[in-house]
Image (tube, rainbow, N blue to C red):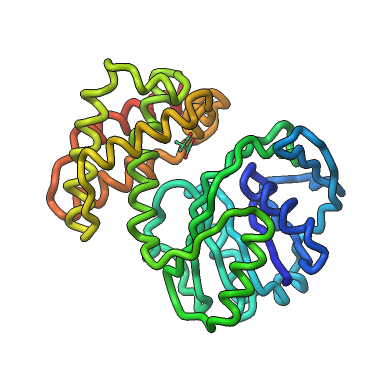
Amino acid sequence: MNITVIGQGAIGLLWYHRLAQNLNNHVSLLCSARITSVPQATKFTDIDDNTSSKALIPANNQILRHAELILCCVKSYHVVEAIASLKNRIDVNAIVIYCHNGMVDFNQLPDLSQACYTLLTTHGSKIIQPFHVQHTGLGHNDLGLIYGSIQQKKQAQVVKALATALPSLTLSHHIKEKQWLKLAINCVINPLTAIDNIENGQLLQQKYSIIIDKLLAEIISVANKEDIIFSFEDLKNQVLDVAEKTAKNCSSMRSDILKKRKTEIDYINGYIANTAKKIGISVPEHEKLIQQVRALEVK
Ligand code: PAF
């Protein structure tokens, strides 16, 4: 397949390397316009600590026109800009896949006639140096159609390309529920670990139980209005389970704060706060965390 990956971050480069390992794929990388010098090769350290390099094929207009699959792996606050940059440059039959943390309001995106999917991944990866990525944890991918329609045969081809590159993968017909579950997990783990500068596992301490309960109660009431029904106990268990399984990890938001980068707070807790406002619900605990993270961002 002709595949273009957008974004030179940890997830973008992980997909670039894994997809390019299959010689049936022609994979290119569309880097952010902010990158002034793009190297000729990228490095990849696999889960067993073996490092290899691959030629970096930058996506130009001609490559983009022939792309059958576009995997958008930019931060949530760059999605609108990245998709706008594709307008009139990609084929109507190209398939666009969004892979980012948090929720983007799709009403803000420029009209795309292409079929769009969302891809939720629990694979762990980190940037060791610019254009050198390490695969740090095996995970699972959930893929679900969020816009448009697609022929079965084409969908099977996409699923095969992605599942072969980075197993395992499930094609989900309930992707909205899964997006909300991931959002709930992010709403708890990301801001709390960023504000207190702690590893994910430390959230299992008793002292975090009350704030976690309050955050979950707010999420559940907002989700409910969006026809997503969570049981409190079940949701809490899932959040704590992720905190336990990623106990030694530095969450993406904590790592953004430590590296003095903008965080995705507006698309995580901010998404809950905005949705709550629209439907007339108050979410004071989320509002508080948003303010605290914003204060850390400007330091
Ligand atoms: O954003 C992150 O860091 C991850 O999605 C998660 C699940 C919170 C684990 O660190």
**Nearest the camera: 93 or 207?**
207
- Whether residue 29 sits left or right of residue 148 in the image: it is right
- Whether residue 27 sits left or right of residue 207 in the image: it is right
Q: For residue 12, say whether it is visible.
A: yes
Q: For residue 80, say whether it is visible.
A: no
Residue 277: image x %, image y %?
A: 19, 49
Residue at 43 percent of width and 73 percent of height = 147
**Nearest the camera: 185 or 72?**
185
- Whether residue 287 sits left or right of residue 66 in the image: it is left
Q: Quadrant of residue 167?
A: bottom right
In the displayed structure, would residue 126 be above or below residue 200?
Answer: below
In the displayed structure, would residue 17 be above or below residue 84?
Answer: above
Residue 163: image x %, image y %?
A: 62, 60
Residue 56: image x %, image y %?
A: 82, 53
Q: Quadrant of residue 197?
A: top left
Residue at 72 percent of width and 58 percent of height = 19
Residue at 43 percent of width and 28 percent of height = 244
The number of numbered badges drawn on the structure is 0
- Whether residue 73 sits left or right of residue 53 in the image: it is left
Residue at 64 percent of width and 67 percent of height = 160
Residue 117: image x %, image y %?
A: 49, 66
